[in-house]
Image (tube, rainbow, N blue to C red):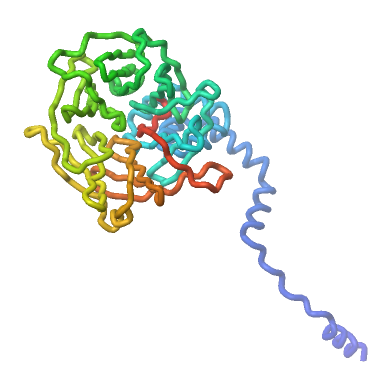
Amino acid sequence: MAAGKSGNSKMLEPFKPPPSKKPRRERNRGKLLGSTPTSEVMEQEIWKEFPEDLFEAVIARLPIATFFRFRSVCRKWNSVLDSQSFSQHCSQVPQANPWFYTITHENMNVGAMYDPSLRKWHHPTISFLPAKMIALPVASAGGLVCFLDIGHRNFYVCNPLTQSFKELPARSVKVWSRVAVGMALIGNSTSGGYKILWVGCDGEYEVYDSVKNSWSRPGSMPSNIKLPLSLNFRSQAVSVGSTLYFMRSDPEGIVSYNMVTGVWKQYIIPAPVHLNDHTLAECEGRIMLVGLLTKNAATCVCIWELQKMTLLWKEVDRMPNIWCLDFYGKHVRMTCLGNKGLLMLSLRSRQMNRLVTYDVMSREWLKVPGCVVPRGRKRQWIACGTAFHPCLTATA
């Protein structure tokens, strides 16, 4: 009976389910908690012995967009940007696709940067400009962007990524009318310096040399160039090597200035018929033209290339027809926000606000996502902008 009772008591014991398997995250967390002191010491020893040169080589090859998080890790990582060896590592990395620095209608003193590789907008805090100063991006070279205030009086140069900033000295020629601006490197990088040229329609011009930190007037406009220049201010200057190219009208064509020799040249080039809102562009030394071709109620964006032998524009591509149908019957205006191999075009009318990019080499058209400020919902209208090659080591 005793044995029976014990057997029955075992049978009446409540059922216990088998122990459940803990999730991998909890098991790993337990292991980490149990080995925290050892792992911390190990990590410290590893990073202490990690070669500084190899560390900088890895950082230099990270995507540019990671820089915004990278700077805030620690002071040591932030100080890497000022290292000469880090600059050398960056110079060995192939040049990234150009970014676009833009100004919106709603926030004229706040910039927005677009990274076409990730198709993402960045909204940096620009603290270098004087309070309530409206300065527009007018040119770029070597990772630096040149700004000119809306009164055409003061010039500023800045690296939008690192906030390296300089206010240029006052110009010796007091010209307050609208001017066209171009910028070019003296060498292969900003370490060798850069030059900025402004030119007015009456032929007045000056050149800024960053090495001398001063403006100078190398000479006067040659007599064979017709004045006034009737510059196309909708078109930014393009640079090929040390030569800057500006678009003009009456007569239609281009004027160029060589930053090294100080020589001006003029090229009479008839514009394509029915052309509006046209602007110069450049790709691997080739001079391009982009503009709106409008006839009757139809409008299309077209791309031309300058033929060096004949000095005529040859059409090489145009926007897909399915996109152009959206422009039919509308009064469309176009602004080119970047002209360095990758173009950004702002197309707008009363019923439309569209941004597209065009890769001159691959002939690829892409729509750009809307620019929305942080914690905002309203899509911003892009007023103006310029393309620049992002560079962490470029200093103003």
Please state the horizontal and vertical placement of residue 353, each as a whole percent of the image.
40, 48
Please state the horizontal and vertical placement of residue 344, each as a whole percent of the image.
34, 41
The residue sitting at the right extreme is 2
Residue nearest the observer in this picture, 83 or 155 = 155
The residue sitting at the left extreme is 309
Left or right of 149 in this view: 344: left
Residue nearest the observer in this picture, 301 or 1 = 301
Left or right of 191 in this view: 313: left
Please state the horizontal and vertical placement of residue 204, each as a whole percent of the image.
27, 13
Please state the horizontal and vertical placement of residue 337, each as a whole percent of the image.
35, 37
Left or right of 75 in this view: 176: left
Q: Is residue 12 visible?
A: yes
Q: Quadrant of the N terminus?
A: bottom right
Residue nearest the observer in this picture, 313 or 285 = 313
Looking at the picture, does residue 304 appear above or below residue 367? above
User: Measuring 71% from the left and 70% from the top, which residue is drawn there?
Assistant: 19
The residue sitting at the bottom extreme is 1
User: Measuring 36% from the left and 32% from the top, which residue is drawn there?
Assistant: 388
Residue nearest the observer in this picture, 206 or 230 = 230
Quarter-wise, where is residue 89 in the image?
Answer: top left
Quarter-wise, where is residue 341 in the image?
Answer: top left
User: Measuring 26% from the left and 26% from the top, which residue is drawn there?
Assistant: 231
Q: How many marks?
A: 0
Looking at the picture, does residue 71 appear above or below residue 295? above
Q: Quadrant of the C terminus?
A: top left
User: Measuring 43% from the left and 49% from the top, which residue is drawn there?
Assistant: 369
Q: Is residue 396 visible?
A: no
